[in-house]
């Protein structure tokens, strides 16, 4: 499978020099306000949310291959203030949705688009949506529409299906079948949950088996999301996932969750003394064990002098 030059360049800029993804996620919306002030999320002001996000981005972005940001709180200020360094990749969320909106039909953020994400210089687009592989035709159509926009603007698409079901609790089957179906829609990278409920299944041999099955089912590279689990659990999951074929991680709350509940010097100390070492540890795991994304997208080696004439993004 080959990539257009724009998509290839986007994945190069979003990954480490050894072609694995070590991405900081701080694109959270309503869940971010809930994390900041669990007892009264609606009292968090826009300014408070922006300030917290900028603190996290400024501290942690230099240790990431890319940062995943939202349009409402993080994106504009992170670029304008320089909190996001120019040599760090940029993923931008295009959807209007959150983890709490289980079963909601996917939709784009109002007044936001792949075209705008392209214009501001992003490396890639991220699309989050809830997904039930047993009843997903309309969601598939939604994903394909965004795939078409990303093809038009020559940006890679990271697709994030978060599974749910009204009939079964078989997370392994749901995650793997979702990855299989969404991978066939033309997305470029899958951003996936760990395919085992680790609260119910404690055997790491089962975790590894599920991750190998997931890798065999995905036609694209896949990265592991942290899904709000504690850091030590996520580090164990990431090690197993990467050894089984994952191409890195996109991690958020497992790294910075406590920091945004703090203020002032306490927030700064947590980011410097706890969160940065966490990022470094996750990156070491990924760089040691992950499968490179270029395994899925071998690069063209033969170029004619007229390639630019025929290039059509």
Image (cartoon, rainbow, N blue to C red):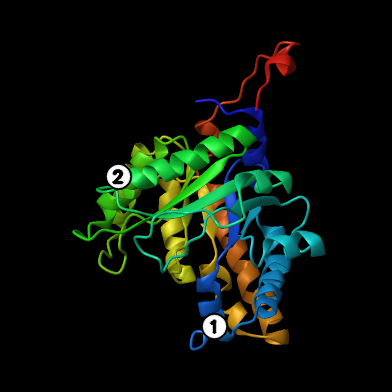
Image mark for residue 177: 2
In percent of the image, x 49 and y 69: which residue is there? 231
Secondary element under disc 1, as helix, strand or loop, is helix
Name the foreground residue: 51 vs 208: 51
Report if residue 291 is visible in the image. Answer: no
Residue found farthest to the left:
167
Q: Which residue is mark 1?
A: 42
Secondary element under disc 2, as helix, strand or loop, is helix
Instruction: Examine the rendered structure and indicate whether residue 180 appears above or below residue 25.
Output: above
x%, y% of residue 61? Answer: 69, 61
x%, y% of residue 286? Answer: 54, 51
Q: Is residue 298 left or right of residue 100?
A: right
Report if residue 74 is visible in the image. Answer: yes
Badge 2: residue crowd in 10 Å (few <14, some 14–19, many ≥20): some
Residue 12: name its quadrant. Answer: top right
Residue found farthest to the right:
81
Badge 1: residue crowd in 10 Å (few <14, some 14–19, many ≥20): few
Q: Are marks 2 and 1 in contact (CB under 8 Å)?
A: no
In percent of the image, x 72 and y 86: which residue is there? 264
In percent of the image, x 45 and y 39: which residue is there? 144
| Measured Cα–Cα span from mark 2 to mark 1 | 36 Å
x%, y% of residue 293? Answer: 54, 38
Q: Is residue 105 left or right of residue 272?
A: left
Image mark for residue 124: none
In percent of the image, x 69 and y 66: which residue is there? 57
Residue found farthest to the front:
111
Closest to the camera, between mark 2 and mark 1, is 1
Task: Give the quarter of the figure containing the C terminus.
Answer: top right
């Amino acid at each position: 499978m080959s990539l257009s030059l724009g998509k290839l360049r986007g994945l190069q800029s979003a990954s480490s020099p050894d072609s694995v993804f070590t991405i900081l996620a701080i694109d959270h919306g309503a869940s971010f306000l809930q994390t900041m002030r669990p007892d009264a999320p609606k009292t968090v002001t826009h300014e408070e949310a922006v300030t917290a996000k900028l603190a996290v981005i400024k501290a942690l972005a230099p240790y990431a291959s890319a940062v995943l940001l939202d349009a409402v709180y993080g994106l504009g200020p992170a670029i304008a203030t320089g909190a996001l360094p120019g040599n760090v990749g940029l993923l931008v969320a295009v959807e209007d949705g959150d983890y709490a909106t289980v079963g909601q039909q996917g939709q784009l953020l109002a007044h936001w688009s792949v075209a705008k994400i392209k214009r501001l210089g992003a490396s890639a687009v991220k699309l989050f949506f809830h997904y039930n592989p047993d009843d997903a035709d309309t969601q598939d159509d939604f994903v394909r529409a965004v795939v078409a926009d990303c093809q038009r603007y020559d940006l890679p698409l990271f697709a994030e299906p978060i599974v749910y079901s009204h009939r079964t609790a078989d997370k392994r089957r749901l995650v793997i079948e979702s990855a299989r179906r969404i991978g066939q829609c033309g997305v470029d990278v899958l951003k996936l949950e760990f395919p085992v409920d680790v609260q119910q299944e404690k055997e790491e041999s089962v975790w590894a088996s599920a991750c190998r099955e997931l890798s065999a089912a995905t036609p694209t590279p896949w990265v592991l999301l942290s899904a709000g689990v504690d850091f030590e659990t996520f580090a164990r999951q990431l090690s197993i996932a990467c050894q089984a074929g994952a191409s890195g991680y996109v991690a958020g709350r497992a790294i910075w969750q406590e920091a945004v509940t703090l203020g002032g010097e306490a927030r700064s100390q947590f980011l410097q003394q706890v969160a940065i070492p966490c990022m470094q540890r996750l990156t070491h795991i990924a760089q040691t064990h992950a499968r490179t994304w270029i395994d899925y997208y071998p690069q063209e080696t033969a170029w004619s002098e007229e390639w630019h004439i025929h290039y059509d993004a």
